[in-house]
Image: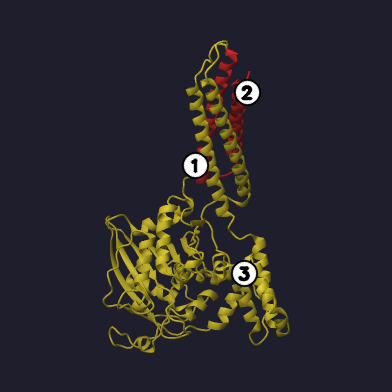
Amino acid sequence: MSEAWGGDGVRAVGGPGPTAVELRDLDAAAATLGAAGRALRGCAADLRAVARVVDAPRLVLEPAPYPFDAARAEALARTAGSAAARADDLVRRLRRVVELYVEAESWVARAVREVVGVQAQVAGELPVVWAAGAPLVPIVVAAAAGRAVAGDPRALVGEQVPSRLVGPTAGFLRGALPGARAPVRDPLGALAGEVAGGDPLPTALVPRADPPGLPAPRSAADVLRNVSASYPEAHGGAPGTAPSTISVQRLTHPDGSHGWVVEIPGTQSAAFGGDVATDMTTNARLVAGLPDDMSSGVLHALRDAGVPPDEPVLLAGHSQGGMVAVAAASLAAGAYDVRAVLTAGSPDVPRGAPAGVQVRHYRIDEDLVPQTDGRPNVVGRDVVVVRRSIGAAQLPHAHALDQYVRTAELADSRLAGSPALRGFDAELARVLGPPGTTAQTQQFSVTRAPDAVATDPATGRRRVPRADPAPGVRSGGSPG
Amino acid sequence: MFDDPVPLLLSALDGAGRARRALMAAGAVPWAGAVAVRYRAEIDGAVLEAAALDRAVGELVALAGCRA
């Protein structure tokens, strides 16, 4: 193993790794290696003592000198000492592997989470128990934190406490809605479906006439910088960028081959059902696993940008944009060669990327947004979560894209070569190409503005109503 | 004898032997995959190093014994 784990609070969870059974063996091996290190340190101490004895002045009547000198014992002591240090280092790295892979949620924890969610739904259905249960809320909060409420409340975010409260809260709210509902395993998705269900509103995909020339990305951090440039100026992006803009970059490698990078920004409106597609309706529909305007917009952007089915594609997004990237990867299966998905500060969505697509999620411990899915990180052979702690004091800035750019940079420098990151890095390199690669950028905005939906702003001609959903899109949402 | 190095050498020999056996046990973990290959390579190197140390300390013990 290499020095691939840890440093600056950045760590990776998931990827190809040992099984649960092997983890126990690895834990035992680490303990045995620790014993080896201790034995070697004792050996080194004994040999240094031997050197001192051999080197000591001797009396006249003593027998002949020892047939070896102190330097020889000292050299062996150094050998034993360095071997002990290497064994200790191996123990440290082995422990790190074990820690990384035991972070996955056990079936017991999952069962407890689901039972609590069901109980909250039942409690929501029974107003008579609300008053009786109210005094328990602070106790539940403290218990979920595993610590006293008297501590710094900001630290609870870093400990993922909000994530544990989302499911029960959603279950309670769903149960409290008028009418009786049967408890479900995913109360958050069910609640989101009730809030934003039904057919999506008509949308239009509007190409930008003068897109900026975003630089050819050379790393995951560069891709996230281009995601940042896809926001409107009011949200920290580039001037002249319309809301809900999707950037599509065609990368031309020095050998003439191509890769494609799609950069998707996050939520830009707190409204439900307004003109801006990157709104709370899209958030709720993504959480509920329903077709949404931005994911189908990405598919139409791929089509309008001329992405061929056999050239590698990377989908990347921040916040809601990351959820869209994952959902769009699912929709694109069979139509486009999506090789990798990159998200920053995004919750998990029910519709995961297809098997074989390399997914990397960057998540900062103190960021509330990724915790709104109400479940532990979903990881697997192809799905890796790179986490970083920035401290409770940074809570207000934890969701900022520049924090995630820094996280990606740290992961590249601190976790380089880690087995957990190798699969994604290989696909990223395949899409981004070698030095000398150039980029052409197109941008498309997804809008629900009635004028844009009815009339093509580029030609001034009325759009023909179309019913050609993006591949895999089940109903509605057909940006034209 | 007050400053006899032999007990120290025997203790060092015992430590080197225990370290070698512990390293061999740690290398027997049933773990597969690319990471495991690198892990075993490191363990194998450490076992060889501990075995060489064991032999070298043993030689010192033998030399000290001859002198006594």
**Rendering coords of residue A466 (x, y %):** 40, 83
Image quadrant holding the C terminus of chain A, namely bottom left
Marked residue chain, label 2: B
**Rendering coords of residue A229 (x, y %):** 34, 71
Q: In this rendering, would A147 be left or right of A73?
A: right
The residue singled out by tag 2 in the image is: B7
Quadrant in the picture for residue A233:
bottom left
Q: Nearer the viewer, mark 2 or mark 1?
A: 2
Q: Nearer the viewer, residue B31 or A64?
A: A64
Q: Nearer the viewer, residue A192 or A154?
A: A154
Could you tell me the amino acid type at mark 1?
Arg
Q: In this rendering, would A333 be left or right of B12?
A: left
The residue singled out by tag 1 in the image is: B38
Q: Do the residues marked 1 and 3 share a common chain?
A: no
Circle on res. A261: none
Image position of A163 with respect to A476: above or below: above
Q: Do the residues marked 3 and 2 share a common chain?
A: no
The numbered mark, 2 or 1, whose residue comes first in the sequence reads 2
Could you tell me the amino acid type at mark 2?
Pro
Chain A, chosen colour in render: yellow
Q: Nearer the viewer, mark 1 or mark 3?
A: 3
Colour logic: by chain
Q: Residue at x 61, y 69 (%)?
A: A164
The residue singled out by tag 3 in the image is: A150
Chain B, chosen colour in render: red
Secondary element type, mark 1: helix
Q: Residue at x 53, y 84 (%)?
A: A198
